[in-house]
Amino acid sequence: MNLTIDGRNAFITGGSKGLGLAMAKAFAQAGGNVAIVARGAEALEAAKAEIQAAAPKAKVAAVPADIRTAEGCAGAVADAVKALGPIDILVNNAGTSQRGPFLEVGEELWKDDLDLKLMAAVRLCKGVLPGMKARKWGRIINVLNIGAKAPAAGSAPTSVSRAAGMALTKALANEFAPDNILVNAMLVGIIESDQWVRRHAADKRNITWEEWKAEQGAPVPLGRIGKAEEFAAMALLLVSEQCGYVTGTAINVDGGRSPVV
C-alpha cells in the first residue's frame, strides 16, 4: 500500500530540524505540499532546500514565526495559506523540555513551556479548523512525549503540558469527528534528533555518539534508539488518505519502552 496525501497542504511547527524536518520530507514525497515553521530563518531555508531536493514537485514554504504568541500563530497560518492555500494537515511539533525539581521551577519556565507546547497548539488548531470543517477533511497530529502518560519525577512542567496536549487531542477528536477531521497524538520515546545530539554534547564523559546511542538504547526493548524517519512513517500513516478510521488516539513511538496504558 502506497500512502498518499496528493495535493494536501501540511503545516508543521518545529519543521526546520529533527522530527519536524523528517515529517516534512515524508509528506512532500507522498505528494503533499508543506509549510515548515520555526524561529530561525536560516535553518528554515536550509530545511526547505533539503525538502525540495527530496521532492522536487512539492510546494515548500519556509515560515519564520514565534508561535509562543497569539500574533505569531495567526501570522504563521496566514503566511502558510498565502504560500500554499488552505491547510489540510496540522502537525503541532514545536516543543521544549522545561524540567527540574518542582519546588525550584519558576513561573517563567512554566509559562514558556505551556505557551509553546499547549497554547500554540490551541491557537493553531483554532486557525485551521474552520477551513477543515468547511471542506469536511482534516488531519491534526499533536507531537508529545511518553511522559504525557507516565511522568517521571522532576519532569514538571514539561510532562504537565504534554498531558494537557493529550487531553486536547481527545477533546478535539470527539468534537470534530462528524466533520471528518481526525486528531491524534504521537508520543515520542528516545528518537534521534537535535535534542539528543545536544544531550550527548553535554555529557562530560567524552564518549562517542555511537557509544552514547548504544547506552541510551540499551533499556529499550528493541535495543536501540529510534530514527526520525521511523517516526515520520507513522505520522504519514495517520495523515494519509488511506488512514480514515483512527482518531482520538495517543500512540507511543518508543520501541516498546512504555508500559501498556
Image (spheres, rainbow, N blue to C red):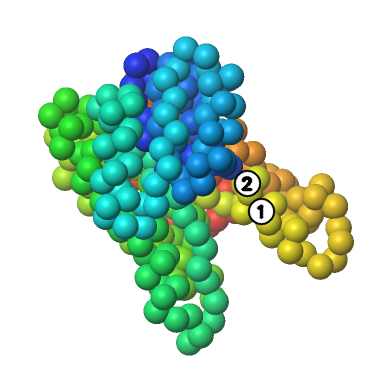
Locate the C terminus and report the quarter of the image it occupies. Answer: bottom left
In the image, farthest residue toward the top: 57
Q: Residue at x 57, y 52 (%)?
A: 189
**Taking the image as drawn, is residue 110 in sight?**
yes
Looking at this view, is 99 or 159 the one in front? 99
Identity, as a three-letter code, of the amino acid under mark 1: Trp
Residue 227: numbered disc:
none
Identity, as a three-letter code, of the amino acid under mark 2: Ser
Q: How many C-alpha atoms fall within 10 Å of the one at disc 1: few (<14), some, or many (≥20)?
A: some
Residue 3 is drawn in which quadrant?
top left
Q: Position of residue 49 (x, y in %)?
A: 56, 26
Q: Which residue is mark 2?
A: 193
Q: Position of residue 176 (x, y in %)?
A: 18, 40
Looking at this view, is 49 or 55 the one in front? 49
Q: Position of residue 41 (x, y in %)?
A: 50, 42
Looking at this view, is 198 or 101 the one in front? 198
2 and 1 marks in contact (CB < 8 Å): yes
Q: Which residue is mark 1?
A: 196
- SS assignment at label 2: loop
Q: Position of residue 157 (x, y in %)?
A: 44, 71
Query: How far apart in space, not on screen, are marks 2 and 1 (Cα)?
Result: 5 Å
